Image: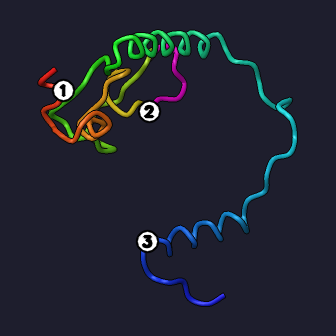
Amino acid sequence: MGRLPTGSLAGINRYSRFYSKNYTPYEGDESFLQPATEATKELWNQVMEGIKVENSTHAPLDFDPDTPSTITSHKPGYINKDLEKIVGLQTDAPFKESYYAIWRYSYDPNFMRNL
């Protein structure tokens, strides 16, 4: 096939070729799945309550304008620590957005402070 060209599409072509050669679609049904646990249902209800508030206000519930978002910028976050088996919120609180998320609202870093 030859050498890939340099530039932004080279990496995309490389990954696309890798996945097309190494991916096998699952063609079965959902019978291998287990039903949601009570903890999962309760966590989901808590998430949906936060989403309802965000949707009604059209704004984040919480915002950190001072800490740029990176993989290590915030302490561990939980929706409900007692119920969770897998953790990994992007910030230290549910529905909290941080600096890089501001771009979805405005390129002005003071945008949220001026509301």
Mark 2 and mark 3: span between their CA atoms? 30 Å
Residue under label 1, please give it.
Answer: 112
Q: Provide residue 33's location: percent of width, then percent of height.
A: 78, 29
Q: Which residue is the extreme one toward the bottom?
A: 2
- Find out whether residue 2 is within the magenta segment: no
Residue that appears at 35% across and 18% down: 58
Q: Provide residue 64's location: percent of width, then percent of height.
A: 21, 28
Mark 3 and mark 1: span between their CA atoms? 33 Å
Quadrant of the frame with the N terminus = bottom right
Residue under label 2, please give it.
Answer: 88
Mark linked to residue 3: none
Mark linked to residue 8: 3
Q: Provide residue 112's location: percent of width, then percent of height.
A: 18, 26
State the image quarter where residue 89 is shown: top left
Mark 1 and mark 2: span between their CA atoms? 25 Å
Judge depth for marks 2 and 3 and give the one in front. Answer: 3
Residue that appears at 49% across and 72% down: 9
Residue that appears at 16% across and 20% down: 115
Which amino acid does the dot numbered 3 rest on? Ser
Residue that appears at 50% across and 71% down: 11
Of the residues under marks 2 and 3, which one precedes in the sequence?
3
Which amino acid does the dot numbered 1 rest on? Met
Provide the major secondary structure of the magenta segment: loop
- Find out whether residue 83 is within the magenta segment: yes
Please say if the residues under marks 2 and 3 sit with CB atoms less than 8 Å apart: no
Please say if the residues under marks 1 and 2 sit with CB atoms less than 8 Å apart: no
Residue stretch in magenta: 81-88
